[in-house]
Amino acid sequence: MLSYLIRRLFWTIPTLFGVTLMVFAMVHLAPGDPAVAMLGEKANPQSVKELREQMGLDKPLTTQYFIYISNILKGDFGRSANSYEPVLNEFLDRFPATVELASTAMILAIIFGVIAGIISAVKRYSVFDYASMFGALAGVSMPVFWLGLILIYYFSVKLGVLPVSGRLGYEFDIEHITGFYLIDSLLVKDYEAFWDALKHLILPAIALGTIPMAIIARMTRSSMIEVMKEEYIKTARAKGCSNFRVIVVHALRNALMPVVTIIGLMFGSLFAGSILTETTFSWPGIGKWLVNAVYQRDFPIIQSATLIIATIFIAINLIVDLLYAVINPKVRLS
Amino acid sequence: MRKLLIITLLFLTTIMYAQPKYGGVLVFGRSGDSVSLDPAHATDGESFYGSKQVYDTLVQFKLGTTEIEPGLAESWEISDDGLTYIFHLRKNVFFQPTKFYKKKVQFTADDVVFSLKRQMDKNHPFNKIGGSYKYWGAMNMSNIVKDIEKVDNFTVKITLQKREAPFLANMAMDFASILSKEYAFDLLKQGKAEQLSRFPYGTGPFVFQKWIKDDKIIYKANPEYWGGKPYIKKLILKVIPNSSVRAAELKVGSIHVMDFPNPEEVATLKADPNIKIITQEGLNVAYLALNMEKVKAFKDVRVRRAINHAINKEAIVKAIYAGFGRPAYAPIPPTMWSYNPDIVKYKYNPAKAKELLKEAGYENLEFDLWAMPVVRPYMPNARKVAEAMQADLAKIGVKTKIVSYDWGTYLDKGRKLEHDAMILGWTGDNGDPDNFLSVLLSAHAAKIPVSNRAAWKNEEFTKLVDQAKVETDIAKRTELYKKAQEIFAKEVPWVTIANSVVVEAVRKNVMGFKLDPMGKRRFDKVWFDK
C-alpha cells in the first residue's frame, strides 16, 4: 500500500512538469502582444515597454520559462500582471468560495443521485424509475447558466424566498477564518449569518449539482441492476437477509465502484461548470477569476493557477484511487 | 386666503419632500471587480469606481460635466509662460482613520509631491512598487512634467517642460489621486508597501472598510468630507457579472443602482414602477480609420468622401447600438467643449458616393475591413457594424473582406499600419479635446507605432491642434479646435460612426444620482427618499 502511494506520488512529478510546459507554450505561442492587449487603445511605446519589462516579456522565451520554473520551485507563483498581487494570494482569496460551492453541489449530487439510482434500480420500470431517469436526462442536457437564471427567476424574483446571487447578505460581516462561510459563521456562533450563507448556497449548488446528480443517478441505476443479477445476491437472500440489508450492504457496496470513479473524474468538470455557475450567481470563486485572466492575457495567473488546479485534480484522483481500496478489498491485493 | 394657505402648505411640503435625508445603505451593482485600488496603477473603469470613493485629486471634474473645479487644491495660478503651476491646497483636510491604519493624518503638500513623484522619479522608493504606472505613461506625463516641489505645507509648485494646456485636466484624472505619504512610508517600514493598492487610506467622501475580491467593496461615509458629509451611511460596490442577474437584483431591491443594463433589458426595467432609467452621452467616439499609407485610393479625398456617403450610420446606430448611441459626425463627442455642430455632415447618399468614386476613377475598389474582436464602451459589436458597412459599400460597387484578430494582435498590427481600414474608437481621459484630436489625428501621431490609424498627415490641422495645446485661454482654444474639426470634416480621414450613450437603471427612491461623461460613479450627493 505504502509503496503504491509512493509510486503514484512519484509519477505526479513528470505530469506536473508537463502541465507547466504545455501551459507556458500555449500562452506564449498565442499571437499578439499581451502588454498591448492589456493597455488597449491607450498603449503608447513607453507604457508598452514598461509593462513588457514588468511582465518579463523582454527576455528570451527559454529564460522566461527557466525563471518561471525556478520561482515555482522556490514557492513563488509570480504576480498577476494586472493587479500585481501574488498569484497565490489571489488564488487563496477565491478558492474557499469555489470549494464550498463545489463540495455542496457534489454532496447534493451524491445523496440525491445515489438514492434515485437505487430506487430506480430496485423498482425498475416503475413510475418513479421513468420519472427520475427522465429527470436525469433533462438534468444532463440543461445548460447551467440557463438553469441558473430560471432558478433565480422563480425562487428569488417571483417567490422571493431565496436571495438572487452572492455569498452573503451585506448586513452580515463574518471574519475570514477558514474562508468557508458555513464553517466560519458557526465558529463565531453567528447563526443568522450561517442561515443566510446557506440560503445563498442553495440555488447555485442546485445549478452546479444537477449534471453530476443526473450522471450519478444513471450510473448507480445501471450498476445496481448489474450487481442485483449476481449469484452472491441470491446467496444473501437465501441466507434470509432482509431486503434492505441485501440492497445496502451486499449490492450497493459493489455497485458503487464505477460510481466512485465517476465522482472523482467529475470534480474536474465541476470546476469547469463552476465558471458558468459563479458568473450567473455572482459567486466570488476562481472560475470567473481564471476566465478574466485569460481574457486579459494575465500570463502569471493563467500559468500558475492552472498548475495549482492540476495539482489539486491529481490529488483528488489519488484519493479516489485509495478509496477503491477501502470499498473493494480486491484492489488491495493487486 | 384659504387658497393661498393651501398653496403655501403645498409649496412647503414640496420643499420638505425634496430635502435630502441622511442615512441608508446604498448597493451599487456592477459588472466586474476592481483590479487595484491604487488608481496610479490601474487602467480600467472598475478600478477607478473603487478608488474614486476614497481618493481626491487636486482639481476635479464638476459632476456631470468636463469642466474643471477645485478639488484638494482650493485655487491655482498659471505663470504667463504656461510652464509653472502653483496649487494652493485646502487646509484642515484629513486622511480618515480606518481599521488597518488608525492615525488621522493631515493632508499637506508632502502628499501631493509623494503621489505624483513616485510615478515619475525612477529612484523613488515607490517607483517599483505595485507594477508600472500605466496612465502616467499613457498620458506621456514624463515628457510634460519637469518637477514637482513643495513650496510650503499648503503650496505645491509643478513646472512643465513645455506649454501644455491639457495638463490641468490631467490633474483631475484618477491616476493623479492624492495618497498619504505618511501611510505609504509606514507600510514601507513594515515591509508591506504593496498593501497600498489593496488598503486605500484617503481624504475622499467615503472611508474604505473591506474588500472581498470579486464580491464587494464596503465603505462608510466620511463625516468630515471637505465637500460635505455624504447622505448615505454606507456604500457597497457589489460585483454581479451577469447583466440579467443584476437586473433581477435591482427588481427585488437588493441593489439600488445597476451599472450597464443590456439594451434588451431596458424596456422591462422601464416598465417596473420602482425603477427609473438615467442616460448620459459618453465621452467617446467609434470610427473607421482609412489607412492612407497602405491603400492608394484612400489618398484621394473623393474616395474618402464617397465611403462616408455610402455608409448608413443612422441605420447602424439604430440596429446595433439599439438606442445606446448617436450617429457621430465630428471626431470629438458633442458633450465635449469646443464641439463644432456646424461642420459638413455626410448624409447617407449611395448615388452621390457612386458618382464620387467614378470621378476619382476607383469604381472597382477593394479593401480589407478590420473589425475588433471585443466589446468596448463605444462599440457593442464591431463584427455586426463591419457587416453592415460591407453591405452598404457593396451597393456602390466596393468589395470588402472582413478581417479580425485577437485584441492584442489587432491593436499591434493597427499600430504598425498593417490594416487597410480598421474600426476602432477612443474614450476621453481628461475631457480635453487635445486628448482626441492630437492623440488620434495629428501628424505627430502618424509615425509608427501610430495612434493616428488613418496615417493622415494634414499640416494645417496639426498646426491648429499644436497651437491649441499651448494656449491657456479657453475661448481661443475653442476657436482653434472648431477650425480643426472643419478641416477634419472636409478631409474625412475617418468615417465617424457613433458616440455611445451610457444607461443606468436606478431604484425610484434613489435621489441625486448623476451619471457623468467621464465615466465616473460618485455617490456623495446621493440620498434615499423612502
Image (spheres, rainbow, N blue to C red):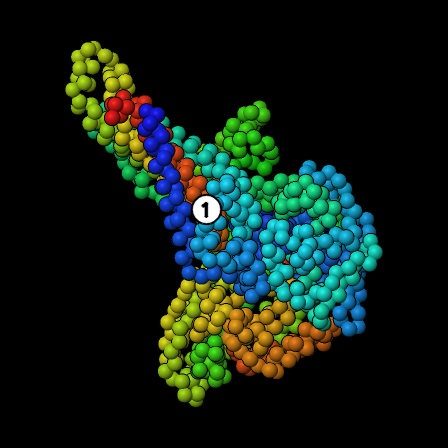
Number of marks: 1
Estimate the x, y position of residue A321 in percent, counting from the top left.
32, 30
Left or right of B516? Residue A315 is left
Residue B333: where, in percent of width, then height?
59, 68
Quarter of the image where one finds residue A146:
top left
Q: Which residue is mark 1?
A: A69
Q: Residues within 10 Å of mark 1 (few under 14, many from 20)?
A: some
Which image quarter holds the C terminus of chain B? top right
Residue at x-position 74% and y-position 56%:
B113
Name the residue at the top extreme. A240
User: Quick check: can you spot residue B526?
Assistant: no
Residue type for callout 1: Ile
- Location of residue A8 by image quarter: top left
Q: Nearer the viewer, residue A54 or B172?
A: A54
- Closer to us: A292 or B124: B124
Residue lying farthest to the right in this orientation: B152
- Left or right: B507 in relation to B167: left
Q: Residue at x 59, y 75 (%)?
A: B444
Q: Is residue B69 left or right of residue A239?
A: right
Residue in the foreground of this view, choosing between B10 and A86 = A86
Q: Is residue A3 above or below residue B352?
A: above
Circle 1 chain? A
Query: Residue B284 appears at what percent x and percent y?
Result: 57, 65
Q: Quadrant of residue B390?
A: bottom left
Q: Nearer the viewer, residue A282 or A321?
A: A321
Q: Image point 55% across, 62% down: which residue?
A: A49
| Coordinates of residue A67 in the picture (x, y in percent) | 48, 49
Say above or below: B159 vs A80: below
